[in-house]
């Protein structure tokens, strides 16, 4: 699951990673929550002949996916995540998987370890970020919902998959991360069928992310400062991530 994330990198950093995308300047966001606007990267509508840059553009959507066939969003559950394993076959996500795959820039995400009631332990929040820093791209889906009066709302969801070894001790799910070399393939909904990009919907290697225990201030949407990511002392010790096998190259997002 992914219920909160952050995007604190500069627009210049995003332009370096998402080649060819013109990002406006924006403030750092340390506590992005469902129903709020999120930045997504989509395939463009065609560049001028001779351009050697990828055809992409950035738009804002509401985090909370609403299928086009829904009559009244108030009567429909808020879909902030979509399971990668089943999204192709789900009525809510089937069309978006085929026609509207997007990338969601993030500096990291928050997750909560919730111990069993029998253990008597307290929930612990974690700030989960790339060990090397920088920006990652979550796999996402987008849908434009149209009301009876003709108004439109662009909505989106984050695809999730089974957590990597380093994160599974906190939660069994995590966002799907798309590598830069796969951006074009993921966004290409004209020639790449959903099943042809299924191999991209994987969790990164166990040591790619690091999990930092933080306070429960992230639970409140009103808290939006960098102090949300300050480490705290946790009673819980996470197991070390699995060692990388020698025959696998280091996963890089830069």
Image (cartoon, helix red, strand yellow):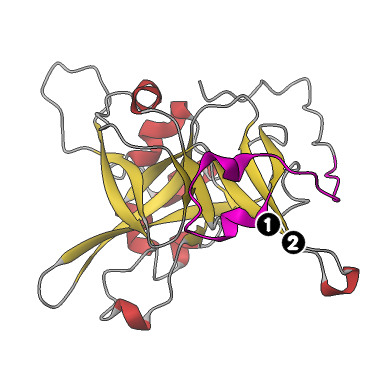
Residue ranking furthest to the right: 119
Q: Which of the 4 quarters of the picture holds residue 11? A: top left
Image quadrant where one finds the N terminus: bottom right
Which region of the structure is painted magenta?
215-239
Find residue 30 and report its horizontal and vertical position in percent: 49, 44
Crowdedness of circle 1 by 10 Å Cα count: few (<14), some, many (20+)? some
| Residue carrying label 2 | 123
Secondary element under disc 2, as helix, strand or loop, is loop
| Residue carrying label 1 | 112
Q: Which of the 4 quarters of the picture holds residue 165? A: top right
Can residue 217 be found in the magenta stretch? Answer: yes
Q: Residue at x 74, y 63 (%)?
A: 114
Q: Left or right: where does residue 31 sit relative to residue 95? A: right
Query: Is residue 199 placed above or below 35 in the rendered structure?
Result: above
Q: Is residue 45 visible?
A: yes
Q: Which residue is drawn at 49% across and 31% down?
A: 135
Q: Left or right: where does residue 172 sit relative to residue 28? A: right
Q: Main secondary structure of the magenta part?
A: loop
Find residue 157 and report its horizontal and vertical position in percent: 42, 57
Nearer-the-camera pick, 79 or 235: 235
Whether the residues at callouts 2 and 1 have beta carbons within 8 Å, the answer is: yes
How far apart in space, not on screen, are marks 2 and 1 (Cα)? Answer: 6 Å
Q: Which residue is drawn at 43% across and 71% down?
A: 78
Find residue 176 and report its horizontal and vertical position in percent: 54, 46
Q: Left or right: where does residue 202 sit relative to residue 215? A: left
């Amino acid at each position: 699951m992914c219920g909160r994330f952050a995007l604190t990198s500069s627009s210049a950093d995003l332009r370096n990673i998402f080649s060819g995308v013109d990002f406006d300047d924006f403030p750092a966001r340390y506590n992005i929550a469902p129903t709020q606007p999120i930045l997504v990267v989509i395939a463009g509508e065609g560049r001028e002949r001779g351009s050697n840059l990828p055809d992409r553009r950035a738009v804002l959507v509401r985090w909370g996916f609403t299928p086009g066939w829904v009559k009244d969003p108030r009567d429909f559950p808020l879909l902030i995540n979509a399971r990668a394993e089943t999204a192709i076959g789900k009525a809510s996500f089937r069309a978006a998987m085929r026609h509207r795959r997007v990338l969601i820039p993030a500096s990291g995400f928050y997750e909560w370890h919730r111990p069993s009631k029998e253990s008597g332990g307290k929930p612990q929040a974690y700030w989960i970020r790339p060990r090397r820093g920088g920006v990652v791209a979550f796999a996402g889906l987008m849908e434009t919902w149209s009301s009876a009066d003709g108004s439109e709302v662009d909505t989106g969801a984050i695809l999730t998959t089974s957590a990597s070894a380093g994160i599974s001790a906190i939660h069994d799910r995590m966002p799907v991360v798309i590598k830069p070399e796969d951006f074009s393939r993921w966004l290409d909904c004209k020639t790449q069928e959903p099943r042809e990009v299924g191999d991209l919907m994987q969790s990164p290697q166990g040591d790619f992310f690091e999990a930092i225990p933080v306070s429960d201030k992230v639970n409140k949407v009103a808290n939006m400062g960098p102090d949300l990511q300050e480490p705290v002392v946790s009673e819980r010790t996470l197991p070390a991530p699995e060692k990388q096998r020698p025959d696998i190259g280091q996963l890089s997002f830069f």
